[in-house]
Image: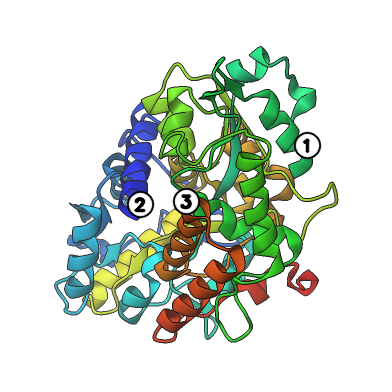
Amino acid sequence: MKKNFLRIVSLALCLALCTILPVTGAFAQTTVLGSAVQYDPAQPVNNGNPITIELWYWTGAANLFQAVADQYTAIHPNVTITLVENPWDDYWTKLPLALQGSDGPAIFNVHNSKHDILIGYMAPYDVETSQLEQDFVGVSAHEIDGKVYYTDYGMMTASMYYNKTMWKAAGLTDADIPTTWDQFREVAKKLTIRDASGNLVQAGFSFNGGAQGDVLGEQYQYGQNLFTADNKVSFNNDSIKAVIQRMKDIYEVDKSGDYNFGNNSGDNFGQGTVAMYLGWGFMNNVLKGNYPDLDFGCFEIPTVTDAVPYAYHRYNGESTFGINKNAPADQQAVAQDIVRFFLANDSLIKQFCLANSVFPAKKSLATDTDILAVPAIAVLANHIDRYIWPGTMPSAVEDNMKIALEDIFYNGADITTALKTAEDTCNQELSGSNFVTVEPQYKYASEAK
């Protein structure tokens, strides 16, 4: 599942860059960039002497990283940036080994799910943390002893995708966009079509193939954190049980979907057999690339009541670059300069955000018209501060929830029993990790149960 997700993300990045964001090397920056974090292009790098560094990234975003290299070297022609691309699996095998010595890349792409295997090789940013906090949201969650080794350039989360053609055919209008789960269930019924024999032809809603992504986030709407104060996962609680029961009821009571009606709700949505599904931001570009004739829109994930919830859902940050602490000092200095250039550069960060359909973590881009023209991003604008990041969540959390949900949905297992088993197994696996939840740093953490 994770490999497929990452391949899709890579495809989304490529499609976005090829069709939405034509990138060129032309860049003539002469004025100081940025607000709190500033970049002065007039300042020489490496005393103007020639230097070559490597920038590593995983497959799927060559044009995007080329834009970084081209724009930076247009200012500093004495710097040569060699881009090194690796497939996702190879990247995480080769990078930690390369970072052990001085011959590894000076700068590299980071994914926060790999925090534990990277952080020991990373140098902190030579940027004041207070300045980062002025320009970006979510910085405090990445601080380690007051230092920042990477932060978020954008926040990806879930929104509800809906087929506009099906919506209109069902007699629905913009006034019918649901804001609560009760309203959503009624809309899903209207969007469901069965043939004369009762066979499902069009699902009003589907979560097949990725239900764990729906569940692990909706419990926040009840004020329930995913982790305890001692960094253990909490599955077996009333909030998650309520989320799962609602999902079961949509299928088993409302008959708006079926466990065996397609095995990937995102693909099925694109193929025109599903009217609504909960997808993450990257799907915006995937759908446009793979299903160009699909007329779709997005609305914010419904909530339990019309009252503003503790959090609408969780998000995951798309990370800024890492700097290799074992690289030669002159290469590290250039890497630090590239990081500052990127952090101060609204244009580049905007390209990265659009490529992955993520809400910008940089405050100056929060009202950018191009970014807010993306449906999956626009619906988040009013409540982006009500989305929570739990931290660099270990894969064991999703893996064990997936097993529990398959047992519940396909084998008829008791919800409590399945969740207890998953919780116990997951916490046993987590006991050997260094995971620390950052839920207590959430802006509204005091409202949790």
Q: Amino acid at mark 1?
A: Gln
In this rendering, position of residue 232 left or right of residue 87 = right
- 79 w.r.t. 209: above or below: below
At horizontal 23% and vertical 75% (from top left) the residue drawn is: 327
In this rendering, position of residue 63 left or right of residue 298 = left
What is the x, y in percent for residue 279?
Answer: 53, 42
Q: CA separation, marks 2 and 1?
A: 31 Å
- The residue tagged with tag 3: helix, strand or loop? helix
- 110 w.r.t. 347: above or below: below
User: Earlier along the polypeptide chain: callout 2 or callout 1?
Assistant: 2
Q: Quadrant of residue 400?
A: bottom left
Checking the image for residue 424, the label placed there is none
Q: Which residue is mark 2?
A: 1
Q: Residue furthest right?
A: 307
- The residue tagged with tag 1: helix, strand or loop? helix
At horizontal 55% and vertical 81% (from top left) the residue drawn is: 232
Q: Residue furthest front?
A: 197
What is the x, y in percent for residue 94?
Answer: 17, 66
User: Earlier along the polypeptide chain: callout 1 or callout 3?
Assistant: 1
Question: CB under 8 Å between callouts 1 and 3?
Answer: no
- Is residue 23 among the parts visible in the rendering? no
Mark 2, other Cα within 10 Å: few <14 / some 14–19 / many ≥20: few
Q: Which residue is mark 3?
A: 410
Q: Which residue is mark 1?
A: 183
- 74 w.r.t. 89: above or below: above
At horizontal 19% and vertical 79% (from top left) the residue drawn is: 100
At horizontal 40% and vertical 80% (from top left) the residue drawn is: 429
Q: Amino acid at mark 3?
A: Tyr
What is the x, y in percent for residue 364?
Answer: 63, 49
